[in-house]
Each structure stands twice: as C-alpha cells, then as structure tokens.
Amino acid sequence: MQLRRRLLKLMAAAGVFGPAGMGGLVSQALAMGKVPVAPGVHKMQGVVTVNGKPARLGQLVVAGDTVMTGPDSEAVYVIGQDAFLQRDNTTLVFGPDAAKSFFRVVTGKVLSVFGKSQDRRTLQTTTATIGIRGTGCYIEDEGSGPTARTYLCLCYGSIELQPSATPQARESYSTQHHERPIYIYNGAKMPTMIAAAAFINHTDDELTLLEGLVGRWPAFYGKGGYKY
C-alpha cells in the first residue's frame, strides 16, 4: 500500500497527459487495487486505428495487428507485461513471432517498457534490428530512404543492436538511466552507422506511468522491476 501511495503521488505530480490522461487512469486503477491493469487500449487521443478501423478503449492489440496514430494523436496500450505510448503519425506492425519480430516501426515514435520475465523480444526499424529483454526504450524512426535514421534511447536494460546497412557492426550494451542515446543511419556511405545523440522527446515521468500500468517501477528507481 505504501508503494501504491507513492506511485499515486508521482502520477499526480507528473501531469504528463493532463487530468483526464494516463496519470488519472493509472491513479484510478491503483486506487481500486487493479495493478497491473488489464491488457488492451487504455488511452486514445485524436485518430487511432487498429488494422485500419477506429480503435476502441479496452480493445486488445495482438500479433498481426497494425496500430496507427494520426496527426496530434497518441495511444497508450498494454500487451501482457509490456506497455506502449505511441505518439502521433506513427505506424507499428506487431509480428506473429516475438523473438523474430515483436513489432516493426514503419515510421514514427514510440516509448515502450518490457517485462523482465519474458523471452527476448526483437524490434525492427528501418535502420536496425534490436533485441531486448526487460528494458525501457524510446524509438523515433524517420522512415525509409538513403538518408533516413532512427533515434534510439535505451532508457535502461540490455540490448543487442544490428544496423541494417552494416550487419557486421553488431554490438551489445546495457544502460541504467539514458546513458547512451544514439542515431542509427541507413546509408552505407556514412562514415559510421551509429552516432551519439542527445536525450530527446521522452521523460522519466512517462516511463514511470507506463511501468505503473503493468505494476512495476522503472529500473532507475532501484527496485528491480518490483511488482505491487
């Protein structure tokens, strides 16, 4: 109960999505003792579709689904022990095999948190294949083209990264708190496929809110993914 009250205070202080947003949704769920919350779509703003049809609150997102958000739109949803904040103008395609392709970012921006107890997940972007387990990460993908790039912040956890243009440049690394945001480029003529980047466009409050949906704290709180 003490942990639940602490998270409620964090939700109130964050105000990331306004009084009617995800903070209020998680606060209500915590107050009723429903943590983690049920899988499905928990927040929509603007135009959100699943497989080309308008999404519904509570609708499940499953393997094979395509989730799209329009301009000035966003969606928050839970799949098992994973939670997602999908920003505007973003298309995600969920594959049938989580180990081979859990989801593919066609274009756009997504913040995701993944449960530690699950098997390895593989994420696809236009510039890289990303293997993760028990992590939080933020991705911005600019789409295809020789000058396209993907922004990746491994917020915490471990990762196996393989640039599409230079598969031999595969590397593995871990972070605790946003230590190594990067750009991954697609053009083989670039001097390097991986370059350092700044920390942009996502927050610890958002990570705390997402982890709260699935009954955890972010790793940077030192709780090791503790469940309520």
Image: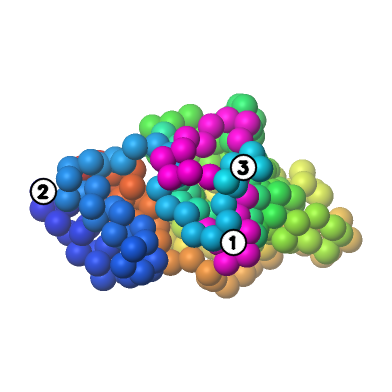
Side of 27 where 22 appears, left or right: right
Question: Which residue carries the number 2 mark?
Answer: 1
Q: Nearer the viewer, residue 34 or 82?
A: 34
The residues tagged by marks 1 and 2 sit, at their Cα atoms, a distance apart of 35 Å
Residue under the image location 75 percent in, 56 percent down: 143
Magenta residues, start to end: 55-74
First in sequence, mark 1 or 3: give its number: 3
The residues tagged by marks 3 and 2 sit, at their Cα atoms, a distance apart of 40 Å
For the stretch drawn in magenta, what is the main secondary structure?
loop
Percent of width and height locating residue 102: 59, 35
Question: Which residue carries the number 1 mark?
Answer: 88
The answer to whether the residues at label 1 and label 2 have Cβ atoms under 8 Å apart is: no
Q: Secondary structure at mark 3?
A: strand
From what the image shows, is residue 148 above or below residue 61? below
Residue type of the residue flagged with mark 3: Lys
Residue under the image location 31 percent in, 41 percent down: 37
Percent of width and height locating residue 81: 39, 37
Instruction: Residue 53: give its label.
Output: 3
Q: Nearer the viewer, residue 66 or 99?
A: 66
* In the image, residue 197 lies in the stretch drawn in magenta: no
